[in-house]
Image: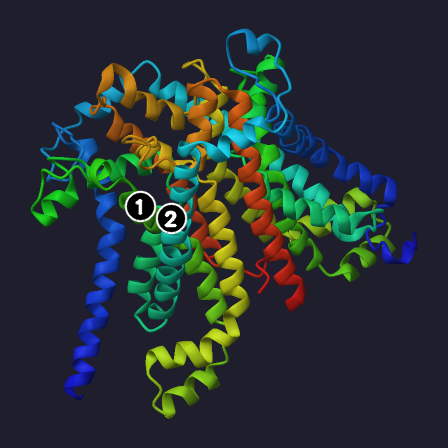
Amino acid sequence: MSPLWMVRRIGFYVLITLVLAFFAVPMLWLASAPFDSKPGLGLRWPDWTFSNVVATFEHPYALTSLVNSLVLCVVATVVTTVLAALAAYALSRVRIPGRDLLLYLLLLLSSVVTGTAAMVPIFVMMLQLGLINSQFGTALVIAGGMLPAAIFILKDFMDAVPRSYEESARVFGASPRQVLSHVVLPVARPGVATIFVWAFVNAWGNFLLPFLLLRDVGQQPAAVLLRTLYDEGGSANLTVIPVFSLLYSIPVVVLYLFVSKRYGFRFHGGIKS
Amino acid sequence: MASSLDSSGLGVRRAVGFVAPALVLIGVFLVFPALWTLYIGITNYQLTGPAAANPRVVGLDNVVEAVRDPLFTNSVWLTALFVLGSAVIGQNVLGFGLAWLLRAVRPWLRRTVEGLVLLSWILPGTVVAYLWFAVLSRDTGTLGLLLGSPETAWLVQYPMTSLIIFNVWRGTAFSMLLYTSALAAVPPSQLETARLVGASGWQTVRDVVFPHIRGHVLTNTLLISLWTANDFTPFLLTAGGPNHQSEVLPVLIYRQALESGQLGYASAMSILLLLGNLAIALVYLRLLRRRA
């Protein structure tokens, strides 16, 4: 063990520690502030209390907005996953005329047209359709934005399902619907699960579209309410914000833990090198 | 249509039926708005007032006005800085560095670091904004306490630097995941050879690893550039302020459209953003095709 080796070893661990601190320090607030009797925008050892939790549950819109988030997110995620799975399967198996062009355009669309770039027409369109403050309408807009990428990723997974499985199922007289539900979907399940989780995390955290399209506080999801808790009266409502942030984060954290335990958080193909 | 190719027995008609619902949704909520941006962008449409009822076509005046508008050029410059600093350099380098360093550490340490990096990626944007207020705010902020200068209001005095560092924290996970899977494809025998001939870490990365993952670097850089250029999270942290110093394009478009009510003018800026996205995407597709 030469001195140089020691120095490099120490340097290595100092570097890892710094990176760890960089990523961990901002998150500590989520553990301390919710249970502090005087929560502030800063980190300190909390003076433990549960009164903030009580105050949050008594807030007139806090729980409603979490329910709104759930409705919005479930509709958008289910619509995205189901429609993307059907489309990806058909595109993977049948040569529909113009399929390659369609796939090319989808890839282009998914990266070029973003909610940010199209926010003005989306707002105007929903305004004229009378769909401002409609949760279902907003969920469909979110789903429409996620679909091209979802179809694209899922098609890769569908392509990997061996065709011989379907052929044998058909030899035994399975209908196309049975082939899809009993053969293809079970085999492509990791792909469908990936899209489901990806869509859920995206829709759950989406701020811009609900912020644009849901103007009534009774319809707003947690993403938007958390923001307006800050604006009311000019200063942040720091009793409610930390606990509410924590509650709002729990679903994605649970989902993350589930995914990393079940599948491991890795890229399995899908990304072309 | 040769039915032998159709192993699923779907048939073209049913296949079209499977694809149609998705296409309808994409058409209504993505393609149509994108095309409509083009139209609104050449009118003087406004949210309120006389031009709201009867918008008039003004041609390319909006685009010309935007290019001459110091707020717009300022915003393009800030967006370029944001993309270059936080995505092309920040997330790319840190993401690769993490993927490279974490190969050699114990599994529990690796899982911890990866877990934290991933968490910073998937937490909702509004929550993350508060987390960073707690780091950067004046008087009580964690950074001020750590550096012993609590009187610094980081988001006000250094808005762009703060946003860039924030976005490195927020987005590095994707690059780390992508490079981790890319590094798994580098033949271990070549790494071993490099070690035996005494190559330094940097030499190994440059001469052995990089040639294998060039395609991944390209994919990664272009994707994170697109996402960063269209990211609305800066709005949550600084809302463009103070005095337009951190007003990246998505924030400028939002403020012009919904706060000033200039829908036509904001759409013209959206068109320019769309064109920027399109340029990046086409470069990417072209490079991808050349490699294939």
Tag of residue A30: none
Residue B204 shown left or right of residue B10 in the figure: left
Sort mark 1 into few (<14), some (14-19) or many (20+) by Cα contacts within 10 Å.
some
Residue beneath the point at 55% across and 66% down: B215
- Per the image, label 1 sits on a secondary structure element best described as helix
Q: Quadrant of the C terminus of chain B?
A: bottom right
Left or right, A46 with respect to A216, comes to left
Residue mark closest to the camera, 1 vs 2: 2
Residue at 37%, 87% in the rendered image: B195
Q: What residue do we see at 33% from left, 32% from top?
A: B244
The kind of residue on which mark 1 rests is Phe
Identify the residue position indicated by label 2 in the image. B81
Q: Is residue A262 above or below residue A77?
A: below
Say left or right for A193 vs B140.
right
In this rendering, is residue A154 above or below B288?
above
> What chain letter is assigned to the residue under label 2?
B
Q: Position of residue A125 (x, y in %)?
A: 61, 20
Q: Say which residue label 1 marks.
A: B166
User: Quick check: A189 above or below B186?
Assistant: above
Question: Can you give x and y, in whole percent of width and height, for residue B254 in the image?
Answer: 45, 27
Q: Residue furthest bottom?
A: B197
